[in-house]
Image (cartoon, rainbow, N blue to C red):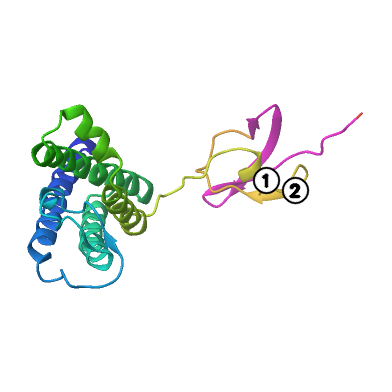
């Protein structure tokens, strides 16, 4: 599966899962209307005129936390590493909610698109949902595999000239490795090369 296909699949999942989480908040709003504690204002912009646009913070975190976990697991299945999964989910969820809220404000407030876009850009629920999704992707994504590279720090164990170490790189054909003007003497050591640097003489 190519990167483009995986990205498109995750983008469609973001739209689907985020829309379900928002719809669930609209459905549950009546049942939690009497809850005390902090509320998230403008979480349901279509109910702004009726004064029912806020939901309890705990409910909002639960809804988009579950959505973020689902998207994070999907990103892991699609082989996104933690960094890419976190950035992709945070930007994707934030962008989709921003567009949905801007469209809702155009309908509810009967204002021009530019004014609705500026208002939607300052809504706290957008940033909260994006942060939850990004955190889920950063935690549930695949670990990034770091490949060792040739050089004095790897070949010599990072302990300076004159100290020996074993390189984890595949065996190279040749007696030495050149890096940054220094020459590292090498000899076979199993499947790798044991390399060391000659002493550096100063004036």
SS for tag 1? Answer: loop
Pointer 1: what residue?
A: 156
Whether residue 2 sits left or right of residue 161 in the image: it is left
Q: Quadrant of the N terminus?
A: top left
Mark 1 neighbour density, 10 Å: few (under 14) some (14–19) many (20 or more): many
The magenta stretch is 176-202
Q: How many numbered discs sit on the rendered protein? A: 2
- Numbered mark located on residue 163 in the image: 2
Question: Is residue 38 found inside the magenta-colored segment of the image?
Answer: no
For image coordinates 31% across by 56% down, the residue present is 132
In the rendered image, residue 199, in percent from the top left (x then y), is placed at: 81, 39
- Nearest the viewer among 43 and 23 is 43
Above or below 69: residue 9: above
Q: Main secondary structure of the magenta part?
A: strand
For image coordinates 74% across by 44% down, the residue present is 160
In the rendered image, residue 6, in percent from the top left (x then y), is placed at: 19, 42
- N-terminal label among 2 and 1: 1
- Nearest the viewer among 163 and 64 is 64
- Nearest the viewer among 5 and 133 is 133
Mark 2 neighbour density, 10 Å: few (under 14) some (14–19) many (20 or more): some
Q: Quadrant of the C terminus?
A: top right
For image coordinates 10% across by 54% down, the residue present is 50
Above or below 175: residue 9: below
SS for tag 2? Answer: loop
Quarter occupied by residue 3: top left
Whether residue 80 sits left or right of residue 63 in the image: it is right
For the residues labelled 2 and 1, say whether their Cβ atoms are less than 8 Å apart: yes
Alpha-carbon span between mark 2 and mark 1: 6 Å
Quarter occupied by residue 161: top right
């Amino acid at each position: 599966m190519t990167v483009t296909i995986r990205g498109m699949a995750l983008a469609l999942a973001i739209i689907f899962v985020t829309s379900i989480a928002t719809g669930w908040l609209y459905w549950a709003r009546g049942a939690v209307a009497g809850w005390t504690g902090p509320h998230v204002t403008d979480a349901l912009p279509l109910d702004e005129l009726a004064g029912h646009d806020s939901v309890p913070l705990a409910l909002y975190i639960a809804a988009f936390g579950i959505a973020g976990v689902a998207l994070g697991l999907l990103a892991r299945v699609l082989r996104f590493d933690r960094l890419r999964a976190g950035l992709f989910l945070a930007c994707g969820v934030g962008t989709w909610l921003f567009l949905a809220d801007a469209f809702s404000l155009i309908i509810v407030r009967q204002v021009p698109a530019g004014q609705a876009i500026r208002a939607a850009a300052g809504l706290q629920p957008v940033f909260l949902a994006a942060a939850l999704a990004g955190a889920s992707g950063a935690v549930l994504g695949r670990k990034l595999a770091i490949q060792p590279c040739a050089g004095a720090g790897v070949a010599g164990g990072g302990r300076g000239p004159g100290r020996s170490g074993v390189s984890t790189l595949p065996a190279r054909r040749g007696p030495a490795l050149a890096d940054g003007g220094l020459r590292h003497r090498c000899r076979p050591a199993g499947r790798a090369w044991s390399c060391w640097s000659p002493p550096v003489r100063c004036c």
